[in-house]
Amino acid sequence: MIILSEYLKKIEPMVYNAGKNILSYIGHDKSVEYKGDINLVTIADKTTEKLIYDFLHETFPEDSIMAEEGNFFEGVSDYTWVVDPLDGTTSFAHNFPFFAVSIGLIDKDKQPVLGVVYNPFFNEYFSASLGKGAFLNNHPIKVSNVKNIAQSLIGTGFPYNRRDIMNIIMRRLQNVLFNVHDVRRTGSAALDIVYVAAGRLDGYYEQGLQPWDVAGGLCILREAGGQSSSYSGDQINIFCPETVVSNGFIHNDFLKIIVK
């Protein structure tokens, strides 16, 4: 049986190095390319993913690896590392300082058992392993105690196919904005989820997410006392394309205003 806390210690120096690699491109050519009309990739995504992939493959050779920019490895263990080397690429490309390295470890049931989300610009290192609590720079974090949806601060994001479903997105956003205190958008799903874990946001929702967008954050959220589900309220794993997270207190009311 693996000791998750030891895994967490092993990857920490590598995650900081990955963050340094990302920051080294600030103020320099980022070699921005388009994977779609809106979806970007930069040289920082690619070089950071290689750094992370090489470390994980060498350090945990039996584990599988699934990374956003195409580095995959099928291992023999029950565990898979899910990597987003640079979550919030659009923010990074525009020098908007909300982007992060996100790494999650999932078990055979596709549930996160370890997670790290690191914003190198602000040097904020969020981490958790199953049953050990959640931390920001080694200090324990917990979700907020806001119980009234009208007093809640909510995060959201917009999917890459937003032009095809603009009416649905705007109708949902209008309904949420009408019923909560206010809405924020960082452009990084990983950061939005851990901001709920740290009590900075009371809830967050988004559709069209990929496994690497949420794998790092969900373990941190759950260890901080938060709740996650699909829009319909069902239990999710990292492959669910729609995600709702909250401090738990507002979750049922939050779901009601999302699905209207």
Image (cartoon, helix red, strand yellow):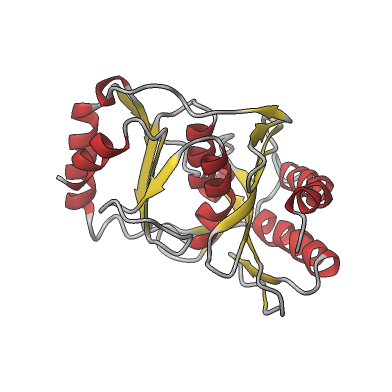
Front in this rendered view, residue 250 or 215: 250
Q: Residue at x 72, y 71 (%)?
A: 63
Examine the rendering and report whether any part of residue 88 can be seen.
Answer: no
Tell me if 15 is positioned left or right of 59 in this view.
Answer: left
Q: Is residue 244 above or below residue 106?
A: above
Relative placement, left or right, of 260 versus 148 is: left
Q: Which residue lies at the image location 74% right of the left edge and 44% below the top edge?
A: 19
Q: Residue 53 location in percent, x, y?
A: 75, 65
Whether residue 12 is visible to the viewer of this picture, yes or no, is yes
In the displayed structure image, the side of residue 56 where residue 226 appears, left or right? left
- Image quadrant for the C terminus? top left
Residue 82 x %, y %: 62, 62
Quarter placement of the N terminus? bottom right
* Above or below for 70 versus 111: below
**Where is residue 149 shown, x and y percent of the image?**
27, 26
Residue at 32% across / 56% down in the picture? 234
Determine whether 182 is above or below 120 in the image: above
The image shows a total of numbered marks equal to 0
The quadrant in which residue 198 appears is: top right
Whether 75 is drawn above or below 68: the answer is below
Q: Position of residue 60 (x, y in %)?
A: 80, 67
- At x 84%, y 46%, the residue is 13
Q: Quadrant of residue 185?
A: top left
Nearer to us in this view, 26 or 160:
160
Furthest-left residue in this view: 260
